[in-house]
Image (tube, rainbow, N blue to C red):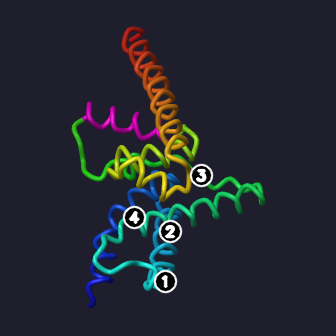
Amino acid sequence: MDEKKAAILQEIPRLRRYARALLRDRDSADDLVQDSLERALVRMDNWRTGESPRRWLFTIMHHLFIDQMRKVSRRGEASILPLDASEALATPATQAESVASREIVDALQQISPDRRAALVMVAIEGFSYAEAATMLGVPAGTLMSRIARGREELRGLLDDQARRRAIRIVEK
C-alpha cells in the first residue's frame, strides 16, 4: 500500500467521530465517511505529498455534509436522529461520567449544525481557528463567532439539564 493511502487510512477514526458529531446517526455518518474517502481516492492528486491528509479530508467531508444538508432541506426530509447511548461513548464509563458525557453529547446535538461543526473542528479535533475557518469555508471572525455562540448555547443547555437533574433528585 502506498504512503498516501496509508496516511488516509489513519484518519478514518477522526473522520468517523466528526461525521457522527455532525449527523447523530451511525449509519448516515458511516455513509458520509465512505463518500468522503471515495472522493479523496478519486482526487488523490489534489493532496500535496508530504502533508498530513487530515485538513484535506475534513474539508472534503464538510463540503459533502453541506451538500447533503441542502438536499435534505430541499426535499423536506428529516434525517437527523438522536444518538443512542452506545454511540455517544466509545468506551464504557462509570455511571457519573456516563451521565455527564451523554448530557454533553445531547446538548451538542441540539445546537445548529454550523456551530456544532465549528466547535467539533476546534475543541474536539484540535484544528486551529485558521485551519477550521479554511476547511469550513468561512472567515476566521465568523468561525470565532460560531464557536463563541455555540459554547454559550452549550453552557445554557447544560445548566438547564443540571438544574432539572437537581430538581429530580430533590423531589425523590
Q: What residue type is labelled 4?
A: Arg
> Where's the C terminus, which quadrant?
top left
Q: Characterize the local packing of mark 2: few (<14), some (14-19) or many (20 or more) Cα atoms within 10 angstroms.
A: some
- Residue at (51, 67) in percent of width and height: 32
- Asked whether the beta carbons under mark 2 and mark 1 sit within 8 Å of each other, the answer is yes
- Front-most of 117 and 164? 117
Q: Sequence order check: which comes first, mark 2 or mark 1?
A: 1
Magenta-drawn segment? 95-109
Q: Name the residue under label 2.
A: 60
Q: What residue type is labelled 2?
A: Ile
Q: Name the residue under label 3.
A: 80
Residue 39, percent across and down? 51, 79
Q: How far apart are marks 2 and 1 (CA)?
A: 10 Å
Q: Distance between the residues labelled 3 and 1?
A: 29 Å
- Residue at (33, 32) in percent of width and height: 100
Local SS, label 4: helix
- Front-most of 80 and 137? 137
Q: Sequence order check: which comes first, mark 4 or mark 1?
A: 1
Q: Tell me the mark number nearer the camera, choosing from 3 and 2.
A: 2
* Magenta residue check for 118: no
